[in-house]
Amino acid sequence: MKKIMKIAAMLTLIALCAVMVISCGKTETPKDTAAPAPDTTAAPGTAAPAPDTAGADDNVIVMCTNASFPPYEFVENGEITGIDAEIAAKIAEKLGMTLKIEDMEFSALIPAVQSGLADFAMAGMTVNEERLQSVNFSTSYATGVQVVIIPEGSDIASLDDLNGKKIGVQLATTGDIYATDDYGEENVEEYATGNDAVLALTQGKVDAVIIDNEPAKAYVAANEGLTILSTEYAVEDYAIAIAKENTELLDKVNAALAELIDDGVVTEIVNKYIG
Ligand code: GLN
């Protein structure tokens, strides 16, 4: 037993060191200093802390997200807030658990859920066939629409006009998948966050950004000279991703979500952020 505990302690230490190295690397990225949407990036010193192994503390439930997706998740006064964070807090409350939120890149969310680093991912995440191979999804709690952000005065007036243009997307999102399928990999620039993609648009590095409508609105409001193409690119359902084997949590989350939808709490939270 002692030996096992020693090994476990050593592994934890190694994991902590690895995370510290990653966190340090993160804070060195000076990317989001030019003209990002306010409140969407962590203030210095608020880099994601070492993720706990989900379930290490029976009473803590770990959600992973990418807090660069306003109004669903963003950083305000050093804290992750938004629609998803608030709904998750209500779910945790119903489960009698304390919610802990880990911020990471969108592409890391499903692996985090699969490996048990997080209990669930909530990140304006679209349900699709490919992801359903890797994780289960809760019932849907919101709808998202993929839209196209362009600079004001752009010659892009329709989805067809995107042919041959440079399109910025957030890595591993459905916007990335559709853009790559429809316009070719060579025309798609992948960025770690939506914020980085929009920053590239403001700097003229890409001609358009494909992203979900609500963050698009937030980014356009926060950056002068941008507008959204009126054509909708795709309509999608957002849901919570949970590990395939954790059907017990899936059932509990679905039950909590059903109550929160029925008694109007979800609508109330959504309306608070989306006018
Ligand atoms: N809805 C998109 C997806 O699931 C984008 C989500 C996000 O960037 N947080 O791929």
Image: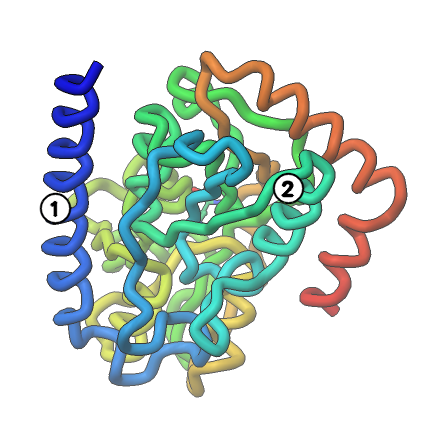
Which amino acid type corresponds to the residue marked 1 in the rendered image? Ala
Which numbered disc covers residue 18?
1
| Residue 274, image quadrant | bottom right
The earlier-in-sequence mark between 1 and 2 is 1
Q: Position of residue 237 (x, y in %)?
A: 61, 37
Which amino acid type corresponds to the residue marked 2 in the rendered image? Ala
| Residue at mark 2 | 92
Is residue 106 visible in this depiction of the protein? yes
Q: Position of residue 95 (x, y in %)?
A: 68, 34
**Do callouts 1 and 2 mark residues in contact (Cβ within 8 Å)?**
no
In this picture, residue 163 sits left or right of residue 80: left
Q: Is mark 2 within 8 Å of ligand 1?
A: no
Q: Foreground: 81 or 13?
A: 13
Residue at 76 percent of width and 49 percent of height: 266
Is residue 229 visible in this depiction of the protein? no
How many numbered marks are there?
Answer: 2
Residue at 55 percent of width and 63 percent of height: 81
Helix or strand or loop: what does disc 1 sit on? helix
Residue at 32 percent of width and 50 percent of height: 104
